[in-house]
Image (spheres, rainbow, N blue to C red):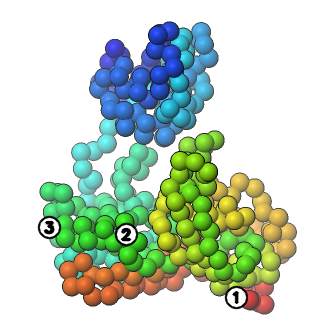
Amino acid sequence: MAEAPPGPGPIRITPAREQAGQRIDRLLAETIGTISRSRVKALIDEGALSRTQEGVRARDDDATHGVRVTEPAEPARAGVTYTLMLPEPAPAAPQPQAIPFPILYEDRDLIVLDKPAGLVVHPAPGNRDGTLVNALLAHCGPGFTGIGAEKRPGIVHRLDKDTSGVMVAAKTQLANDVLSAAFAARDLERTYVALCWGVPAPISGEIEGAIGRDKRDRKRMAVVSHGGKAALTRYRVIRAFGTSVALVECRLATGRTHQIRVHMSALGHPIVGDPVYLRRIPAAAKGLTDAVRHALLDFPRQALHAASLGFSHPRSGAALRFETPPPGDMAALIALLEADCPELTG
């Protein structure tokens, strides 16, 4: 059995012949003995596992030497050295940090905010602090009455780091439970606006396709034929800028990871600026002036904004609805398109 190092660093194992064929995540967890299988799977998803070629010893001065392993279910190979990198340990609990954010509404049960683009919601590997959770802890202080026996915000839904817009967080166990159930049952309203390449046809419709991990890249999601979770997005074109770009409204009937980004890409109309699902310069870019084309291609994030959120108050049952316009960077891009393509449809 391998022993985990006292701190972060590489763990190396070389399966024996009788261990060949076992799932690599299970074999690592059983061999190391101090890390759960779920933790091993998470580390593999983060790109922390690599393997050498058979008979080649991993170099001590290069812990990432070898071929990255992306599938937790990959069969182990005898005589191959696997290197699992353990990251720096995370703090026991997120710490309060004074990070400003726009507040739309707040009472004793919940807080509604307009999340800025670039703000990560929850601490995770690579973003241990500087997150919305850290900001909420600083803002609310003792305002959290205890969620899961801890004074912390209840994150009942999330937005991607570079997606802006309306979010709600719970401050009490009651709000956490009721809002979590509402999101799970899709018993609320969520509307997004986005700029996409090209103009979807028809100009309104539904995109339905199960979403799961991309088998070629574990950091991406994809529409899959087997093993995914059912997903449905309803869209309509608000404005078309010639045939090059469209401002679209998307409503979620389900809430899967990267759902709008994956579905719009699968439809052939990826989101402008998307660093994950836009891999090449779209043909639609040819119809734009140089200035507008460069502005769109250089946009540093996905042009996606959570425009509205409606739900019932968890304590009173009152109907609440909050709406925010796209932030300055996205608004400037829309204004540039309007000036370049004044003839709008939709």
Relative to 255, say whether 110 is above or below. Answer: below
Dot 1: few (<14), some (14–19), or many (≥20) neighbours within 10 Å?
Answer: few
Label 1 secondary element: loop
Q: Position of residue 119 (x, y in %)?
A: 44, 63
Mark 3 or 1, which is nearer the eye? 1
Q: Is residue 46 at least partly visible in the picture?
A: yes
| Viewer-side label of 2, 3 | 2
Disc 2 packing (10 Å; few <14; some 14–19; many ≥20): few
Q: Quadrant of the C terminus?
A: bottom right
Q: Does 163 appear above or below 332? A: above
Q: Amino acid at mark 1?
A: Gly
Q: Position of residue 180 (x, y in %)?
A: 31, 66
Q: Helix, strand, or loop for circle 2? A: helix
Splitting the image into 4 quarters, where does residue 189 fall?
bottom left
Which residue is identified by label 2? Answer: 185
Name the residue type under label 2: Ala
Near-viewer residue (47 or 235):
235
